Amino acid sequence: MAGYKPKVISLTKRPGQTFGFYLRLEHGEEGHLVRCLEMGGPAELAGMKDGDRVIRVNGTFTDALSHSVVVDLVRNSGASCTFHILDEASFKQAKAEGVNLSKPQSTSVANGVAKRAPNLKLCYLLKSSSEYGFSLRTVKSEPGLFMTEVTPGSVADRAGVKANDRLLEVNGETMEDSTHNQAVDKIRLAGASIMFLLADEETDRYYQSKHMKMEACLATTKYLPHKPRIIDMTKGPDGYGFILREEPNQTGHFIKDIERGSPAERSALKDMDRLVAVDGEEMDSCTHQQVVDKIMQSGKDCCLLVVDKDTDQMYWQGRVSPMLFWEEMKGSNSPPSYTEAINLPATVQQASQVQVREEELKPKLCKMERTSAEYGFHLKGIQGVHGQCLEVEKGGAADRAGLDDEDVVVEVNGVNVEQSTHEEVVEIIHDSGSSLEMLVAKKSVYDQLTAKGVTITRLLLEETSYAQVHNQESKEEARPETPSGPARERISSVSSSASQGSFDERL
């Protein structure tokens, strides 16, 4: 039986003060949930998180008690109360395993964290040709659907699909009771993109042996091509420099009208990013005013979880919340800022890793002039798939400008191309004329920064400080607002269409 080690949190409140959170029961959810944490309140400062489950109050096991009884236990405790807390993922996993949470658990603990079951995986396939590059198989002696004949280098292979993976869900719909033909039809009708929930052989054996239900909330997001972004901002004297809006015919809260030079721009917020969470609390069910109030309550520092259009659509297609990414990142104590990332003390870095000097954990901005008809590099990518790297010809313009083999292309002429297709990047380069400016990162640097949640921009090329921006609160909208006065230059929205140009597109 897997073990779980609850956090023990003791809270003390002053006269007239609350402990700073709501205790809730919710339809479709088990347990007594921690919700609506007051920023700076006793609970939030002590480390409680939204979605945590209260297992005990002053030593009394609460899982089998009614909501009103648990509330009374807290209220009758006076100015101090001790809670045993399990995070949401651990609580759901414990329930799935049938763990008796009322008994003390003797578990092996690594670095203070109970060992977890292996993760399921979410894989997003974006078709670039007529096939995904895999087959489905069924075996009479073994119920279920399994991946087979995964073609090396295919869409499926690049998305993380492996032979013998068990297929659990297609676009958020369970395949547990589906026949082989029904699953095939579902995949064929999905169109050019599809989200799978899969379990590899080891993970499948583990869950089957524990009789655990395999759900998307227990999956890793590391294979997904589009990543939500964790934005840490420090408020300027007059605000963060963006407007929060609700858009017609769209669900959610959107970032708009970002001030040039503002904390929002410096943190790489983008126009029409959808706001998912503020300081770790999901905002989807909140009103516009509640979201604004939450941001205002953050003080001078605020952490936002946002998704761009492609990322939002991908998670929506799989019927998965981007909060799954947040929870996964939170498991590693949340991604540090760029400055924190490059200054991590040696004691918290893995011994097997060679420490990277600060100047190496930065991108490169390379400017070049076309010689003859070429810049002297090949753009390596697969048509229809995002992400491009370089193969550089020695002695060419690109080589002289400082580009290296396997550099990852981040920006071309100021336009971020990380989520652009090969054809779109080719067209931007074609349109550049006789000169070209590229922001690139060595692949190892790119992987480290993105793994730490650091958005790569040219701001990382130098020590940055937040510029003072003008920002007023609009009484009409109750949101961060730009002041009246001369119009400010806004961030341009740039889009490129695919092109079948003559630029060298060697794969």
Image: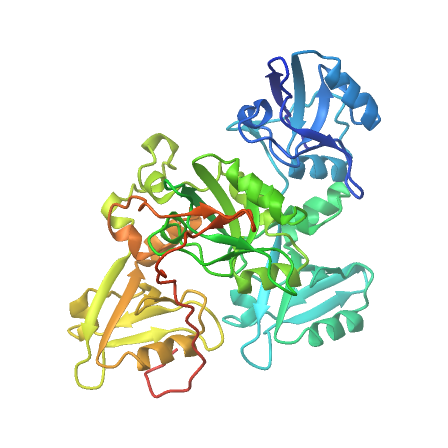
User: Outermost residue toward the front?
Assistant: 485
* The image quarter in which residue 200 lies: bottom right
Residue lying at 76% horizontally and 47% vertically, measured from the top left:
213
**Toward the viewer: 137 or 118?**
118
Q: Which quadrant of the figure contains the N terminus?
A: top right
**From the viewer's perspective, is residue 168 above or below residue 96?**
below
Residue 484 relative to residue 66: left or right: left
Q: Which quadrant of the figure contains the C terminus?
A: bottom left
Asked if residue 460 can be seen in this view, the reply is: yes
Q: How many labels does the image show?
A: 0
Residue 22: x, y in percent? 69, 30
Color scheme of the displayed model: rainbow
**From the viewer's perspective, is residue 10 above or below residue 43?**
above
Residue 325: x, y in percent? 56, 49
* The image quarter in which residue 141 lies: bottom right
Asked if residue 280 can be seen in this view, the reply is: no
**Toward the viewer: 317 or 493?**
493
Residue lying at 48% horizontally and 42% vertically, measured from the top left:
303
Residue 25 relative to residue 478: left or right: right
Residue 435: x, y in percent? 22, 76
Residue 41: x, y in percent? 57, 25
